[in-house]
Image: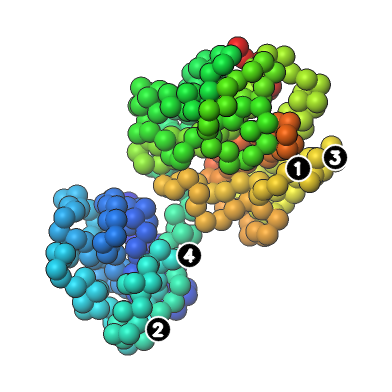
Amino acid sequence: MYEQRIKTVRRNLANRGLEQMLVCDPRSIHYLTGAFIEPGERFLGLIVGSDARPTLVLNALFAAPADAACTVRSFTDTDDPLAIVEGLCDADKPLGCDKNLPARFLLPLMERGAASGFVLASDAVDDARAIKDDTERELMRAASAANDAAMDRFRRLVHEGVTEADVAGQLEAIYRELGAQGHSFTPIVSFGANAADPHHEPDDTPLASGDVVLFDVGCRKGEYCSDMTRTFVFGEPSEKLREVHDTVRRANEAARKLVAPGVRFCDIDAAARSIIEEAGYGSYFTHRLGHQIGLDVHEPGDVSAAHDAPVQAGMVFSIEPGIYLPGEFGVRIEDLVLVTEDGCEVLHSYPRELVSIG
């Protein structure tokens, strides 16, 4: 598995005229080797050459798994890790660099002449990560199934007077009971007018009758992320809420139905956005339609008007239209889709209709 991923990255590098790369993103290193290390302020880098086994340059405080698909070169806090990197690079050839390579490491490598040039090459890895293999697809399905099960329990935490923070504080334990590794991102729990802020952070706002209740939540299974949003109402919904919710639901459905290999990301965005615009709420849909997802909850490649590349089989991304009415409420419905050879598989099965809870 890891050998094939390295081969793909090498092919991507070759297409860019490169034979060597320094990968520093911990999730990308995990993807390529099976070793996941969060180094903090210390150096961590994987040197990928044109033929030799990749070499992980790692502080001795951390341990790579015995079966990691790489050679390990350790250093201590008093050693110079960049000297190791310099020795592993071919100074006569350009070096592809990771977007996560800090300037405090990049600039000294440039000053030392570790390579003939330094080129941003993150897309060589990002493009490989975008196409999920069979193992990754199963993990994405498992994470999404756990999110479906969790959502049904989350809605039961809601009662009059409970605060957003009270509810948010109980979510991780439910995920862990369901066999997940915890949150894939900080959960969003929004009541009432707070739901009009797409990235609202849970606070001490108490729930009142008639409030919208928005959950934007995700968990990890085998380190792979899920991400789903559902919008409920506590009590009876107003006619305006019914109209807005139905508009968002139809926008979500239209985008999902369009997904297939060869369809452009911008056209998927337009399918959802046009429905919201036709309903008169275009100016209240204030963000892109979605983002790619995998080991990171937000991976490169968004679903937006600015992204005209075609989708490919194996990609996984979110479809999350929303309408946000300041001072009133917000509605968002989000699903993950896996692009198949002839369409897409929707990874979430939790109902999208407006449900009254409490």
- Which of pointers 1 and 4 lies earlier in the amino acid sequence? 4
The label number, if any, that marks residue 80 in the structure image = none
Secondary structure of the residue carrying numbered label 1:
helix
The three-letter amino acid code for the residue at tag 3 is: Gly
The three-letter amino acid code for the residue at tag 4 is: Asp
Q: Which residue is mark 4?
A: 123
The label number, if any, that marks residue 284 in the structure image = 1
Comparing labels 3 and 4, the label whose residue is closer to the camera: 3
Q: Which residue is mark 3?
A: 280
Q: Which residue is mark 2?
A: 117
The three-letter amino acid code for the residue at tag 1 is: Tyr
Residue positioned 67% across, 48% down in the render: 287
Circle 2 residues within 10 Å: few <14, some 14–19, many ≥20:
few
- Which of pointers 3 and 4 lies earlier in the amino acid sequence? 4
Q: Nearer the viewer, residue 192 or 42?
A: 192
In this rendering, would 337 be left or right of 84? Answer: right
Asked whether the beta carbons under mark 1 and mark 4 sit within 8 Å of each other, the answer is no
Comparing labels 2 and 1, the label whose residue is closer to the camera: 1
Secondary structure of the residue carrying numbered label 2:
strand
- Which of pointers 4 and 2 lies earlier in the amino acid sequence? 2
Circle 1 residues within 10 Å: few <14, some 14–19, many ≥20:
some
